[in-house]
Image (cartoon, rainbow, N blue to C red):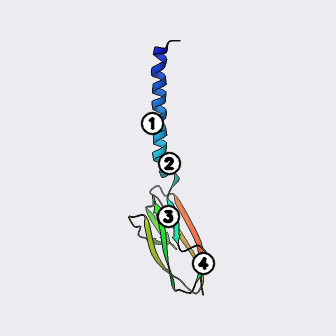
Amino acid sequence: MDTKRLVPKILLGIITLIIAAYCLFRFLPLLSGPDLVLISPAKNITTTESFVDLVIATQRVSQMHIQGLPIDIEKNNTTTYRYYLSQGMNNITIEASDTYETTKKIAFFVLKK
């Protein structure tokens, strides 16, 4: 076996594997879509207040809607929105999408007494 011919091919294979792994590492978050986490309030709560402040952590989000209404996204990746409650059970839906139109939804209930 001629090692002088084999060594460059092995090095090229290792370099190609490193580049492919780095590209996958960098683009995997883009492929996974938006990240949407409800920080506050806890899901499915009961309150006597007339509103709740929704605190939402986002990453890779270009558009966000609460109950179908567009919401401005804060640059610090944490958005606060005051949602006014109606009497009884309130079903709140938060939907976020990224630039590739991949969407993620969060739905929860708030009971106003």
Q: What is the three-letter code of the residue carrying label 3? A: Ala
Disc 1 target residue: 19
Give me the residue at 50% from left, 50% from top. Answer: 31
In this rendering, position of residue 104 left or right of residue 59: right
**Marks 2/4: CA–CA distance:** 35 Å
Is the residue marked by circle 2 packed among few (<14), some (14-19), or many (20+) residues within 10 Å?
Answer: few
Q: What is the three-letter code of the residue carrying label 2? A: Leu
Q: Position of residue 19 (x, y in %)?
A: 45, 36
Give me the residue at 46% from left, 40% from top. Answer: 22
Disc 3 target residue: 96
First in residue order: circle 1 vs circle 3: 1
**Marks 3/2: CA–CA distance:** 18 Å
Residue 11 versus residue 2 in the image, above or below: below
**Marks 4/1: CA–CA distance:** 48 Å
Residue 85 versus residue 24 in the image, above or below: below
Q: In what element is the residue under mark 1?
A: helix
Q: How many marks?
A: 4
Q: Nearer the viewer, mark 4 or mark 3?
A: 4
Q: In what element is the residue under mark 3?
A: strand
Give me the residue at 39% from left, 64% from top. Answer: 76
Is the residue marked by circle 3 packed among few (<14), some (14-19), or many (20+) residues within 10 Å?
Answer: many
Mark seen at residue 4? none
